[in-house]
Image: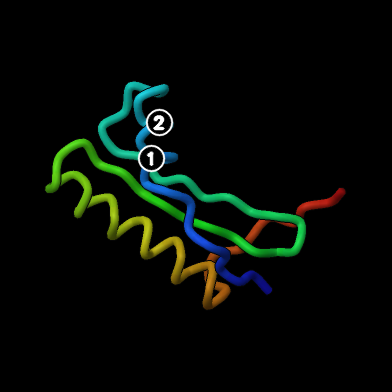
């Protein structure tokens, strides 16, 4: 089972978008305890709102099990 951790900052997503020359980005991270975090970023307010829907869908899918979380082995 996955549970949400504290969200990473929007600055994390913005830096990822800048590094990839992307207008929108979703960052999903998992830790060894089975927790995850998601954050999204869009260059404009409209792009941010658009990609936030995908970010929310990913989070809800992980919460309800309809999206499988990776198994992380140490």
The reply to whether the C-beta atoms of the residues labelled 1 and 2 are less than 8 Å apart is: yes
Residue 36 appears left or right of 24: right
Q: Residue furthest right?
A: 74
Residue at x 48%, y 58% (from the top left corner)? 7
Which colour style is shown? rainbow
In the structure shown, which secondary structural element does the residue marked by tag 1 occupy?
Answer: helix
Query: Residue 40: which numbered mark, if any?
Result: none
x and y, in percent, of residue 11 in the image: 38, 40
Q: Which residue is mark 1?
A: 11
Task: Give the farthest residue toward the bottom.
Answer: 64
Determine whether 18 is above or below 57 in the image: above
- Percent across and percent down for residue 2 are 64, 70
| Residue located at (53% from left, 62% from top) | 6
Task: Specify few, some or many for label 1: CA neighbours under 10 Å numbering under 14, 14-19, or 20 or more.
Answer: few
Of the pair 16 and 73, the residue shown nearer to us: 16
Asked whether, in this view, residue 1 is left or right of residue 17, the answer is right
Circle 2 packing at 10 Å, graded few (<14), some (14-19), many (20+), is: few
Q: Quadrant of residue 17?
A: top left
Which residue is pictured at 70% across the width and 64% down the height? 34
Give above or below for 45 relative to 55: above
Identify the element where label 2 is drawn.
helix
Against 19, residue 6 (above or below) is below
Q: Which mark, residue 15?
A: 2
Residue 56: percent from left, percent from top:
36, 64
Q: CA distance from mark 1 to mark 2?
A: 6 Å
């Amino acid at each position: 089972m996955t549970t949400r951790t504290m969200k990473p900052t929007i600055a994390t997503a913005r830096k990822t978008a800048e590094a990839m020359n992307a207008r929108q980005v979703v960052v999903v991270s998992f830790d060894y305890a089975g927790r995850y975090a998601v954050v999204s970023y869009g260059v404009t307010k409209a792009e941010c709102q658009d990609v936030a829907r995908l970010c929310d869908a990913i989070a809800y899918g992980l919460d309800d099990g309809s999206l499988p979380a990776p198994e992380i082995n140490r």
